[in-house]
Image (tube, rainbow, N blue to C red):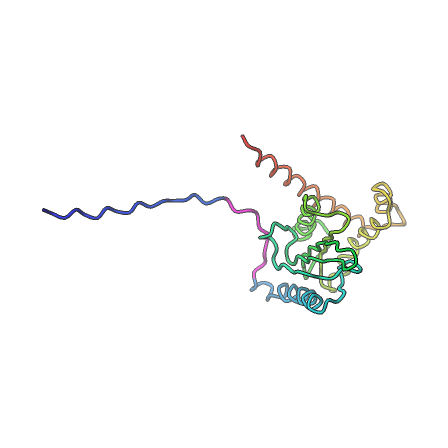
Amino acid sequence: MPKDRPSKRSKTVVAQQPAKPRKKLASLAATGDRGGAFERRVQAVRLLAMCLGAACSGVRQDFTIVKLQFQGRIHEHNTDDLVVSTRCGATGQTATVRMQMKRSLRATANPVFEEAVGLAWLDFESADFQRELDETLIVFDVASTGAMKGAIEVVNFARSSTSFESWDTKVHAPGFSNDAIRTAYSAIKGAVETYSLKLVAEAKSARPL
């Protein structure tokens, strides 16, 4: 009797899930990896501080670094270049510092600045964010200080204000503020509004039918 032909194995095709939006990345050919080198220098300083148990810029007073997560997007952080876990030796409190590194940055309405601020806002709105303890830092090279001066002053005004109304008045007061500060404020406000709308849209799409 003729032998039965071996049956063909059936193939199972699995539909791929749509990928989550990713940060826009510049090619190494275009940047010469200058941004990557800057990022690694910032990370190395925090790694050394953790190994030595030393104080470090951007970490709260009396807190020391106990853990570092590099590229923390996989751990559900939006500000993800470096996630720094810290602990206060006296109280046992823990806090998280999320860091985004941008070698070149300008405080105007541009895609790079919008993304950095918008992702920081998403982390701030997260249920995991401890508003009295956690911090988000957007770190840029000293060469960008002039281009970021307006944003620096916006943050300084916020820290010295007791209410939104007081902060808003300082930003827009003639003779007290300037065009660079108002431009930075507008760019920050625009980024927050844009990413807030994205957050609402994602929440609606996640609702069960």
Residue 101: percent from the left, percent from the top?
A: 67, 59
Is 170 or 138 nearer to us in this picture? 138
Q: Is 172 situated above or below 208? A: below
Residue 170: percent from the left, percent from the top?
A: 86, 46
Is 78 or 52 nearer to us in this picture? 52
Q: Residue furthest left?
A: 1
Q: Is 118 situated above or below 42? A: above
Residue 100: percent from the left, percent from the top?
A: 67, 56
Is 1 or 88 nearer to us in this picture? 88
Q: Residue at x 61, y 55 (%)?
A: 72
How many marks the image carries: the answer is: 0
Q: Viewed as shown, does residue 34 lie left or right of 175? A: left
What secondary structure is the stretch in magenta mostly built from?
loop
Q: Viewed as shown, does residue 56 lie left or right of 204? A: right
Q: Residue at x 14, y 48 (%)?
A: 3
In reply to whether residue 24 is colored magenta, the answer given is yes
Write down the region rendered in magenta.
18-27
Q: Residue furthest right?
A: 175
Q: Is 110 situated above or below 42? A: above
Assign the C terminus to one quadrant of the image.
top right
Q: Residue at x 11, y 47 (%)?
A: 2
Residue 177: percent from the left, percent from the top?
A: 86, 50
In reply to whether residue 144 is colored magenta, the answer given is no
Is 67 or 102 nearer to us in this picture? 67
